[in-house]
Image (cartoon, rainbow, N blue to C red):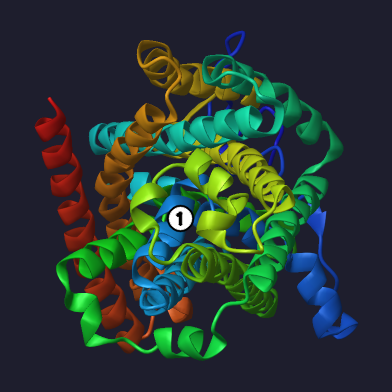
Amino acid sequence: MTGPFARGGRPRRKTSLIETANGLSLGEINSTIHVPSEHRGFWRNLLAFSGPGALVAVGYMDPGNWITSIGGGAEYGYLLMSAILLSSLIAMMLQYMSAKLGIVTGLDLAQATRAHTGRRLGFVLWISTELAVMATDIAEVIGGAIALKLLFGIPLPWGVALTVFDVLLLLLLMQVGFRKIEAIVATLICVILVVFLYEVAVAGPDMGAVMAGFVPNSQILGNGQLTMALGIVGATVMPHNLYLHSSIVQTRDYDRDDASQVDKAVRFATWDSNLQLGLAFLVNCLLLMLGAAMFFGHGDGLGTFTALYNALGDSSIAGPVASGILSTLFAVALLASGQNSTITGTLTGQIVMEGFIRMRIPLWLRRVVTRVISIIPVLICAILFGGRESALDSLLVYSQVFLCVALPISMVPLVALTSSRKIMGRHANSLWMTIIAWIVVVVLTALNLQLVVQDVSRLVAML
């Protein structure tokens, strides 16, 4: 319901820009996309339900993952392919639960969590999740600014400032409809995929070693290898994706009182999610394969985006296949990745604000506030350190601390809610999935805490 009344018939109180929100998740787009009846066939239904998975998959191939994946290949060859596989399987499980929660209950994860906690705890959870969204936004700002510098020679401080204007892009997209937004995001994902397919094909990886890398090896237990593997697994699952997916699956219009229609929605949302996350898995594999095929033995000097960009055009590092075309395509993919994440980050911010504290503001204002707050530390860092990218890359690493802290805060209620037969009915998680999910929660929490300790220790050492 998108009129003046929220769910339950309670009116929304409005001021000029702020209104209370206690109704449908993202009410402006909830149930706005028609889906065909069951007899229209599998492919027709899959196409109708496809889209939310693409927006979710963006978070699994954002700029924050690039350095880790390429660096892992550059330092350890194809050894860590199994870490990417494990991360993707975990992501598929958690996103399946998230989509199922939204479809079955009609609530997104923030709304459902608030309903089973309360006002005070909801406010605390909102703050922690907002910090995670802003930390993600910092990675987008840095990735976008560096891409602008690499492609057009724009100094980093100016590039950081220019990223504020992507609010205009968002406003334009919101006018054309959510279905078109899904299509644009999917197109940008295809751009990223094609770029890295081409670059890896040129690099000529050892496919036998790639296949062997998917089998866990005891060598991963070495100190450096284990740290890098933890970084890949711990940084892959993004907390904001769990909130996002539980909301945007509700954009499909079907009879929510018809059990067969709900079953169909869950089934096709799962297909959509797994197919799109499969593409994200492929992109992350390509990143590691690129690092292993072109930069193995040069891992120490490839800790920044600019270093990777330069290396792709340097025959002394990348070998005879090095070229300016490879470097330019890398920067284009980086820019596309940042723009994709901008769209999903803004939607997630609105979801958690409405869900946890039941307050709604216009999306354009949401985007401006989030982006301005995010660029302040990036801009200060760029100016103080003379536009050196290494300083921005360090800031990117430390911004991930908030993501590490927010992840268990998102996973615990997700697993608890979707495992409850009282809440989910016959769609509750099976016993074996519940056990696996809680093991994943414990392991990922431990991995993320270890990453926090490492990052804080590194920061203290710098001081």
Please indicate, yes or no, whether residue 246 appears anywhere in the rendered image. no
Q: Residues within 10 Å of mark 1 (few under 14, many from 20)?
A: many
Residue 76 locus on image (x, y percent): 34, 70
Residue 257 to residue 146: above or below = below
Q: Which residue is mark 1?
A: 242
Residue 355 to residue 18: above or below = below
Q: Nearer the viewer, residue 227 or 170?
A: 227
Left or right placement of residue 69 versus residue 166 in this view:
left
Q: How many marks are shown on the rendered structure?
A: 1
Q: Residue at x 63, y 49 (%)?
A: 313
Please indicate, yes or no, whether residue 95 appears anywhere in the rendered image. yes
Q: Quadrant of the C terminus?
A: top left
Q: Quadrant of residue 189?
A: bottom right
Left or right placement of residue 392 versus residue 176 in this view:
left
Left or right placement of residue 123 versus residue 265 in this view:
left
Q: Quadrant of residue 255?
A: bottom right
Q: Residue at x 74, y 50 (%)?
A: 325
Residue 140 locus on image (x, y percent): 53, 36
Residue 216 locus on image (x, y percent): 31, 86
Q: Quadrant of the N terminus?
A: top right
Which residue lies most toward the right here? 40
Residue 418 locus on image (x, y percent): 39, 69
Q: Residue at x 42, y 46 (%)?
A: 110
- Element on which disc 1 rests: helix
Q: Nearer the viewer, residue 334 or 48?
A: 334
Q: Nearer the viewer, residue 8 or 337?
A: 337
Q: Residue at x 72, y 43 (%)?
A: 29
Q: What is the three-letter code of the residue carrying label 1?
A: Leu
Q: Quadrant of residue 128?
A: top left
Residue 6 to residue 374: above or below = below
